[in-house]
Amino acid sequence: MSEPESAPEQPLLAHLMELRTCVVRAMFGFIIVLLPLLFFAGKLYHFLATPMMKLLPAGSSMIATEVAAPFLTPFKLAAVVAFALALPWILYQIWLFVAPGLYRNERRLIMPMLASSTLLFYAGVAFAYYLVLPTVFKFFVTSAPEGVAVMTDVSKYLDFVLKLFLAFGFVFEMPVAIVLMVLTGFVTPAQLAARRDYVLVGVFIAAAVLTPPDVLSQIMLAVPAYLLYELGILVARWVAPVPEPAESTEI
């Protein structure tokens, strides 16, 4: 393996200064995205609450059980959305900090990894919003006992939705995680393929823990997770170096 293409080693203080610069730039990018979103915080929350609002009975609405919840909850959502939108810029700053210490082949892989992991996380969130949330909320609303008015608290609704977004976002990162494990030599594609049955059971157990207690939402998390596992094996076989066969000697 070739030596890292980097400048001469710098003292610790210089590395700390570079780290501070990257952190400041990342925070500055986050603030730039956050400021305009604050003016649309109410509309953002309305968009997030649409899957639930469409299913509420006529005359029902969301409620705020805390005094500051009508203000703080949309603000919190705006901050989360700003972080998600600024994520490529934040990851780029991390890349600028660690790149000088990487080998040339590692540099060629890290940027595609960062880009694909970001896109996959976005895809997981979109999958949860457009497919999972309507299904889950329909189950909750239709299963309410007769005479019970369904009126969800705004802050608890946001916490519930963000947990689902994180669960699906991280599950969609599975191909990237598999490729990284293979490239670091932790496992091989053959070993991953040989443990398909264990993984299938594991994803259904994880889905039961991460999702609400309805079977449909658990299946909607477990099935994509397993398919992404298979996709990760295929990609790992494509990018992983093929070991050279050992030379056999005859006596």
Image: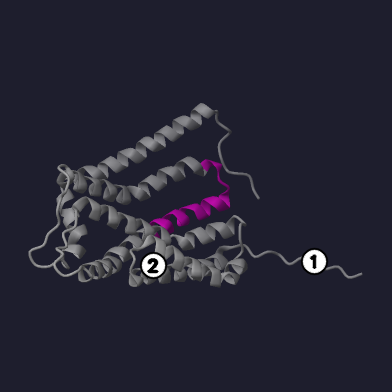
Vertical arrangement, residue 240 with respect to residue 215, above or below: above
Q: Residue at x 62, y 69 (%)?
A: 190
In front: 108, or 39? 39
Residue 35 location (% of width, % of height): 21, 42
Side of 232 relative to 190 (left or right)? left
Q: Quadrant of residue 244?
A: bottom right
Horizontal and vertical percent position of residue 221: 38, 67
Q: Position of residue 49 (x, y in %)?
A: 19, 59
Spatial separation of the CA atoms under disc 2 and disc 1 = 46 Å
As drawn, the label of residue 247 is 1
Q: 10 Å neighbourhood of mark 1: few (<14), some, or many (≥20)?
A: few
Q: Which residue is mark 2?
A: 221
Q: Residue at x 16, y 42 (%)?
A: 68
> Upstream in the sequence, badge 2 or badge 1?
2
Q: Secondary structure at mark 1?
A: loop
* Up-down relation of residue 59 to residue 97 (above or below): below
